[in-house]
Amino acid sequence: ESEFTYYGSMGPDHWSEHYNQCAGKHQSPININDVDVIDRRYPEIKYEKFDKKPLNATMTNNGHTVQVKLIYDGQAPMVSGGPLAGKGNYEFQQLHFHWGEDNTVGSEDRINNVSFPMELHIVFRNIRYKDFAEATQRDDGVAVMAFFYEISSDQAADHDYDTFTSNLGKIEEPNSVANMDALTLFGLMPDNLSSYYTYIGSLTTPPCSEDVIWMDFNTPIGIASKLLDRFRSLKTFDGSSLTHNFRPVQPLNNRKVYRAKK
Ligand code: BO1
Ligand code: ZN
């Protein structure tokens, strides 16, 4: 295994030299053009335990992103329904973020060629598969819920994120871990979950496994610009700042993007 970065000789243009799936035809991220999107009705999404507090919460600087792991007493959060209907139950694995060097870039998927300053990925695995590695081998194994951020000066909206990001200073070094206050998944998500895009893509980092079922929610999460700066001060393996960690958009090829409406 070789490492990967977001610039230079191990940057996204070179990932497929070491990870052949990164050259696949169903890759993520993509640009979503509203004019090409197909409206579709889906069953309601069922959110289980999204308001449950974990026993333990840690954040890790893995050199590529801030990854949050949550350990639960008993059942972890699960999602089903929506585009996952008939495929089974999907259990929470981890969540993490993608951001950019300034507020004009950062999100991975784009909407009408517009980037958002940051994107949250909440990663799920179909419980019919024994672990994440096996799930990535299946076309119904992995689902990711994606949320976009927008710059907001509404301090109240920041509450969960202020607490969360105030711990980022403890994990500036790659491979460092910090304990954090227990948070709920709903606490990080916007209130309005009624409209989302969905399409079939991949993991956005090596090994770029296909297929991943993506759900990109329309309502952005408001965050203060100064909180985004805390993400940008993390360091990567070569000692430089992790100023950006989004993969460029990939060809849509023969895929369709759907918009779920209630
Ligand atoms: S993403 O949501 O498409 N950006 C994405 C990219 C990579 C992973 C997950 C989501 N990687 C995998 C690791 C596994 C790990 C799993 C769940 O995440 O390769 O080792 O088990 O945490
Ligand atoms: Zn991600």
Image: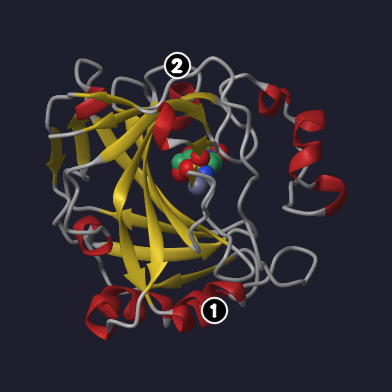
**Residue 91 shown left or right of residue 244 in the figure:** left
Amino acid on which disc 1 is placed: Asp
**Residue 188 shown left or right of residue 115 in the figure:** left
Q: Name the disc covering residue 229, or none.
A: 1
User: In the structure shown, which secondary structural element does the residue marked by tag 2 occupy?
Assistant: loop
Q: Position of residue 34 (x, y in %)?
A: 40, 36
**Disc 2: which residue:** 138
Which sits in the foreground, 249 or 170? Answer: 249
Q: Are marks 2 and 1 in contact (CB under 8 Å)?
A: no
Asked whether residue 131 appears in the rendered view, the answer is no
Which sits in the foreground, 117 or 98? Answer: 117
Is 30 drawn above or below residue 243 in the view shown? above
Residue beneath the point at 75% across and 36% down: 15
Q: Position of residue 9 (x, y in %)?
A: 87, 48
Amino acid on which disc 2 is placed: Arg
- Between the C-alphas of marks 2 and 1, the distance is 37 Å
Q: Position of residue 246 (x, y in %)?
A: 61, 52
Residue beneath the point at 56% across and 22% down: 26
Is 181 drawn above or below residue 40 in the view shown? below
Residue 59 quadrant: bottom left
Mark 2: few, some, or many residues within 10 Å (few <14, many ≥20)? some
Q: Position of residue 194 (x, y in %)?
A: 17, 43
User: In the structure shown, which secondary structural element does the residue marked by tag 1 occupy?
Assistant: helix
Asked whether residue 13 appears in the rendered view, the answer is yes
- Front: mark 2 or 1: 1
Most distant residue in the front direction: 35
